[in-house]
Image: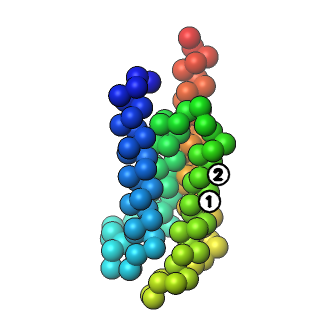
């Protein structure tokens, strides 16, 4: 990936993580509403974020795994302090799993591409 593209990916990755923090820790009224079940929304959001982080930091797999799983846990725990929000282990597991699937998907694509070359 070229340097400008990597810079854009890195900006997008951190912006997505910030957005996840806002909708996870902020008031429930800030949470976007869709017609999807809440756990599917969570999973998709974290999978997309994981995919972008894996693209942006292809050489730092362990670091991004720790970052995303840690962020999912910390964001969930932070809900304890927010009225009308509640921390749940199942929510954390869905978020962490989504992030890991996003990372794993990009890594699998990267491995296939490198094997073809």
**Image quadrant containing the C terminus:** top right
Of 71 and 97, nearer the camera is 71
* Element on which disc 1 rests: helix
* Residue at 47% from the left image edge and 50% from the top image edge: 49
How far, Cα to Cα, is label 1 from label 2?
A: 6 Å
The relative height of residue 22 versus residue 60 in the rendered view (above or below) is below
Of 42 and 13, nearer the camera is 13
Q: Residue furthest top?
A: 117
Label 2 crowd (10 A; few <14 / some 14-19 / many >=20): few
**Image quadrant containing the N terminus:** top left
Q: Position of residue 31 (x, y in %)?
A: 36, 72
Label 1 crowd (10 A; few <14 / some 14-19 / many >=20): some
Residue 86 visible (yes or no): no
Of 106 and 61, nearer the camera is 61
Q: How is the image coloured?
A: rainbow
Q: Is residue 19 left or right of residue 74?
A: left
Q: Position of residue 25 (x, y in %)?
A: 45, 73
* Residue at 43% from the left image edge and 62% from the top image edge: 20
* Element on which disc 2 rests: helix
Q: Position of residue 2 (x, y in %)?
A: 40, 23
The image quadrant that residue 30 belongs to is bottom left
Q: Is residue 22 left or right of residue 95?
A: left
Residue 73 visible (yes or no): yes
Q: Which mark is residue 51?
A: none
The relative height of residue 57 versus residue 14 in the rendered view (above or below) is above
Q: Position of residue 22 (x, y in %)?
A: 40, 68
* Residue at 59% from the left image edge and 31% from the top image edge: 59
Residue named by callout 1: 70
* Residue at 59% from the left image edge and 52% from the top image edge: 67
The relative height of residue 77 versus residue 114 in the rendered view (above or below) is below
Residue named by callout 2: 66
Whether the residues at callouts 1 and 2 have beta carbons within 8 Å, the answer is: yes
């Amino acid at each position: 990936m070229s340097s400008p593209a990597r810079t854009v990916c890195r900006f997008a990755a951190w912006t997505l993580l910030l957005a996840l923090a806002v909708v996870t820790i902020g008031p429930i009224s800030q949470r976007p509403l869709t017609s999807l079940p809440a756990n599917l929304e969570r999973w998709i959001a974290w999978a997309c974020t994981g995919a972008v982080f894996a693209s942006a930091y292809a050489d730092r797999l362990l670091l991004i795994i720790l970052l995303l799983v840690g962020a999912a846990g910390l964001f969930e725990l932070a809900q304890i302090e927010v009225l009308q929000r509640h921390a749940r282990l199942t929510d954390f597991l869905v978020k962490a799993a989504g992030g890991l699937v996003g990372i794993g998907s990009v890594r699998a694509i990267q491995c296939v591409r490198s094997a073809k070359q």
